[in-house]
Structures are given as C-alpha cells and as structure tokens.
Amino acid sequence: MVQVMRATPIILVVLLASMSASRENAAQQQSAKTPSLVLSPCNVEGTPEKVKCGTYEVYENRDSKKGRKISLKVVVFPATGQEREPDPFVYVPGGPGSSATEDAPYVAPQFAKIREHRDLLFVDQRGTGGSHPLNCNFYNPADIQSYFGYFFPLEDVRKCREQLEQKADLTLYTTPIAMDDLDEVRAALGYLRLNLFGGSYGTRASLVYLKRHPKHVRTVTLQGVAPTNQYMPRDFAQSMERALQGILAECGADEACNRAFPNLRAETQAVLERLIQGPVEVEVRKNFDRGGDNASSVSRPEERVKIKLSRDLAVEAVRYMLYHPGGASRAPLLLHQAAQGNFVPIAEAALSYRRNLVGSGANGMYLSVTCAEDLPWIKPGEGERLAANTFLGGYRLRQQREACALWPRATIPSDYGEPVRASAPVLIFTGEWDPVTPPSNGDAAARHLPNSLHVMVPQGAHGFGGLEGIDCIQRLNTEFVEKGTVKGLDTSCVKNIRRKGFIVAP
C-alpha cells in the first residue's frame, strides 16, 4: 500500500506531463497548419502561368531578434493534380549565391511529375535574389581585360564590403542561419515537412537543414554532394584533375574522338607548358557570349579586342567546361586547337564563364559563406600540396584566401564540419566525372545516412545535360519522392545513360 501511495503521484506526474506534451505537440501541429504567410497570384518571368508569390520578414540577427529585418522572397508553383500531398518539393540552388526564384522557371518543368501532387517551393536564401541580395560588381563591361584578371579583384572586394556593410551585417549570411530562415518560412506557410532537392552548394544547405530540423524533413535528394567538410576550394585542383584525365581517357576510347585527336594527352600537356611560360595574346570577339555550352554565339557585330590570356583563366575555362557533359564533350577540341596555337576558343569560353557564371549572382553572399565555412579550415600548405602538378594549379585557393582576408568572418557552430547523421531517406546522384564534387563525396555522405542510396551517373559531370537517357534520373527522383523511401528503387536504367559523342570539329 505504501508503495502504491508513493507511486501514484509519480504516475500522475508522468501522465500529466505526457498529456501536456501531447497537447503542446498538437498545438504546434495545428499552428503549423495555419499559414501566417499569405501568398498572392503573380507572374514570374519565363513562366506563362500565374503562380503564387510573397515575402516573409525575418530578423537579420536571429539570435538577438532585434534590429534590422530582411524580407525573403517566396514563390510557390501550386500542385497541378486533384490529389495533393501536404509536403512540398523544395528546390535549394547552388552557388553559394544563386537565386531559387530566378531559377524557378527553368527548374519547375523538370519536376512536372512531382508537381502533379506537390507544391514546388522556391525561397531565395538570405543574401540572394529577392532576399536582401549581397551583390558585388567585380568586372568592368567596358574593359574586356578585366574579365581575364583576378577571380575576386581585391580592390573591388574592398569596395563591395564598404558598400554592403551600410545595409547588412556580413557575418549573418551563413548556411546555418539561412536554413533556420527556411524552416521559419516552412512553418509560416503551414507545411509540416519538406522534400528537399539540393544541387552543388544546395546539397550542403540541404544537409545543414536536415541536421538542424530533422523532424521537418520527409525526403532529401542531393545532386553533386558538397558536404560541410569539403572546404572549398581546397580540393578543386585534384577533383578537376581526376575529371580531366577521365575525359581524356574516354576520348581515347572513342573511335571518332581518338581519330581526330590521337595525341590528346601530349597536346594537353603542351598547352599547360605553354601557358606556364606566360600569358598568350589573343584577339576575341568583344561581344562574344554563350548562353550555354552548346549555344551559338549571340548575333552581334563582330568587334574584336586583344586580351592577354593567363594560365589561370585558360585552365579555369577548361574546368568550367567539365561541369557539364555537353561542355566536356567540347574540351578535347578546344585543347587540340590550343595545342595548334589557336587559343581563341578557350579565351572566348573563359570570357563567357566569367560573364555568365562568375560575374553573376550574389558574390558578397558567396564570400560571407566561404570565408567562414571553408577557407579558415584549410590547413596551411594543404591546398598547395594538393594542387601541385595539376592542370588547375593553386591559383583559385590563393586568390580566394586573399579575398577572404578582406571580408568579415562569421562564427559557425563548432560541430559544423561533422558528417550529418540522420534517418531521413536520402537519394544521392553523382556524375562519374564531376570536377568539383566527385563520387567519393557521395560515398562519404551516404556512410552516415542509413536510409540513403548513392547512384553514380555514367559519364555524368556536376550536371547531366548532354547525356542520353537522363530521363532515368528524373524517373528515379519522382518515384523516390512519391514513395518516400529508397527501398525498392530500380536503378537498372542508369546503365543506359551515355554521352552523345564528342565534338571533333569547330
């Protein structure tokens, strides 16, 4: 009796606590189902239909919850079918610095099947697009040579910092803070869980969200894994070298490519040796601009200008070509032309990438992220050692380190570089010849994600455009999101993915 009398209050306390927790959990769920962010019909450039748009205010300093507030741009492409699931599909872009909402018109059609049952959610990460962008102007359109200089011109970095600090605390634009923003937007829209899709840097952001908000994740799809302990650009030189050698070997095994360029390895080495001697003077089309690896030149007057092409810019152009199979298919031709003394194609490719890739996006946000999450953790001499005797060399690490010395360094969580461990289902895609996030990254991430599946795409790169059979990837991702598990996914169609062929003539 005494034991019962003593136990009863304890049982009641446990029951009351359980009931209280249940009521609190129910209240939280009910709150999550009641949107506090109301979206309005809107037009998004590049999309013929009306979608829904809105903005959501967050504190720039999430910890203090005081001071400046910033608006986050939100776009939702509503589900198209009658049977709608409550958890949206969220696109998390790369960069860091790309805008999710600006990518939306091009991304949404790729996920049309998923959209039949789920909203597609696009949120500009703080510091990008329509969310208090941290834009920097690093190159002078009137001076073509400026595009052939430093990756981050130091004087321009100083000026940009001075300008941005008038409207932003540059230490408050890191990935963990941004992923807490995303979770707040999720709750404000009334979604309980998300299906995340991250590409490149977006994979890092998605993994950080998974780590910080695991209960609000239903599925995660990662394409080209950039984990938190891949300290960019430490491994860039080795990852590019692996991809370049893979493409050279593939060309050698391809009848048409090998016939056109039988001495490609020797020619590639000769190109590097010539560039090491000093810059090459090249005359390029001033208005040359390629919208993509397989796009034709924009029709404009053929005004030409002389520039000096350094080793840094030439190898950077080759590196960016390897990002997509379509560009990689052109690389042997451009290397062969350079070996014959014609550096114009590589120079014009370098100009295009600087204008359309490096020179666009929120470079201030890129610096705020990488100068806190990457550069400080690269050991002295480590990057230089890894870059030795490679085609790329160490220029990128050296120049980015110099830029970060001029940029405020944010504080990140002490366990930030630890592998993400979570039980959520995760589907990972990696290109065989990815020059920046190689398959080993996908393997490393998968080891700590027990419900994951890593699929390596044959002859794929950082992206998969230019390959035959890549509808297989879309089908796998759609089935994964529909079922919410990697179990039972039939990946046999992957073996039918292949390159369309190499471009062997100008």
Image (tube, helix red, strand yellow):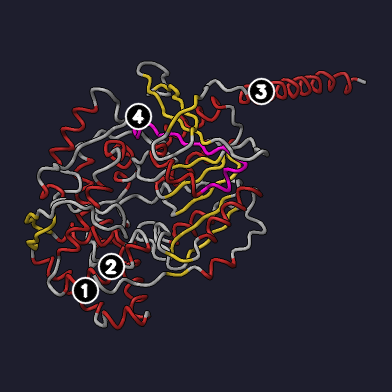
Q: Is mark 1 on a helix, strand or loop?
A: helix
Q: Mark 2 points at which residue?
A: 331
Q: Which of 229 and 141 is in front in this view?
A: 141
* SS at circle 2: helix
Q: According to the image, label 4 marks what residue? A: 172
Q: Kindly identify the residue that appears in the image at 9 percent across and 61 percent down.
A: 282
Magenta stretch bounds: 111-130
How far separated are the C-alphas under marks 3 and 4?
Answer: 31 Å
* Lower sequence index among marks 4 and 2: 4
Q: Is residue 78 depicted above or below 383 in this figure?
A: above
- Mark 3 and mark 2: Cα distance apart in space: 55 Å
Instruction: Please name the amino acid that badge 1 sits on.
Output: His
> Mark 3 = which residue?
30
- Label 4: state its secondary structure: loop
Looking at the rendered structure, the kind of residue marked 2 is: Ala
Q: In this view, does 249 lie above or below 176?
A: below
| Amino acid type at image mark 4 | Leu
